[in-house]
Amino acid sequence: MRRDDRDEPFDDLFREIERMMNEMMNGADANVDFNSSSDVENGFGMDTHVDIHEAEDELRVVADLPGVEKDNIELECDGKTLTISATSDHRQYDERVSLPQRVNEHTASATYNNGVLEVTFDPAEQSSGISLE
């Protein structure tokens, strides 16, 4: 029985993404292969996930950082972007998360428990109008 293209509708898409990723990395000893499992030394890869939760009184960023010790996490925020840097024995993770609204970075609090990082911010005060005289 001949294989029909409709059997695997995303094969071409994944092959094209794989080709573009390999081209971007200029073949620097790292070929992306969506069919293979993640190797520990290739970074956090599919193990990492970042969610942003907005509420009226706070903005919460939740990131999965499996295998990272609390002391190996660095956080920075400029009010618009949260930068998460983390390392473990075999992995390095650097992520710049664009926040959906401006936050007051001075009110930030963070917790890390069982590989889950949670950073909470208060929204920034709204800008006031400027009267022109």
Image: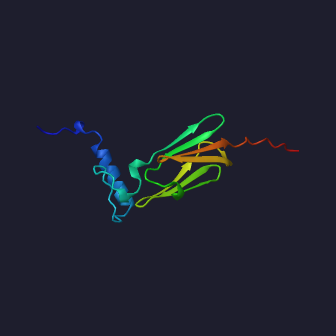
In percent of width and height, residue 101 lies at 63, 42
Q: Is residue 57 above or below residue 99?
A: above
* Quadrant in the picture for the C terminus: top right
Colour basis: rainbow
| 118 vs 29, nearest the viewer | 118
Q: Is residue 82 above or below residue 2?
A: below
Badge count: 0
Residue 97 in the figure: left or right of residue 66: right
| 56 vs 117, nearest the viewer | 117
Which residue of the protein is positioned furthest toward the bottom in this rendering?
Answer: 28
- For the point 58% across and 41% down, which residue is it? 60
Which residue of the protein is positioned furthest toward the left in this rendering?
Answer: 1
In percent of width and height, residue 79 lies at 65, 49
Which residue of the protein is positioned furthest toward the top in this rendering?
Answer: 56
* Quadrant in the picture for the N terminus: top left
- For the point 33% across and 56% down, which residue is it? 39
Residue 121 in the figure: left or right of residue 19: right
| 70 vs 99, nearest the viewer | 70
In percent of width and height, residue 40 lies at 36, 56
- For the point 36% across and 65% down, which residue is it? 28
Report which quarter residue 3 is drawn in: top left
Q: Is residue 49 above or below residue 41?
A: above
- For the point 37% across and 55% down, which residue is it? 21
Q: Is residue 22 above or below residue 127?
A: below
In percent of width and height, residue 47 lies at 40, 48
Which residue of the protein is positioned furthest toward the right in this rendering?
Answer: 133
Residue 123 in the figure: left or right of residue 17: right
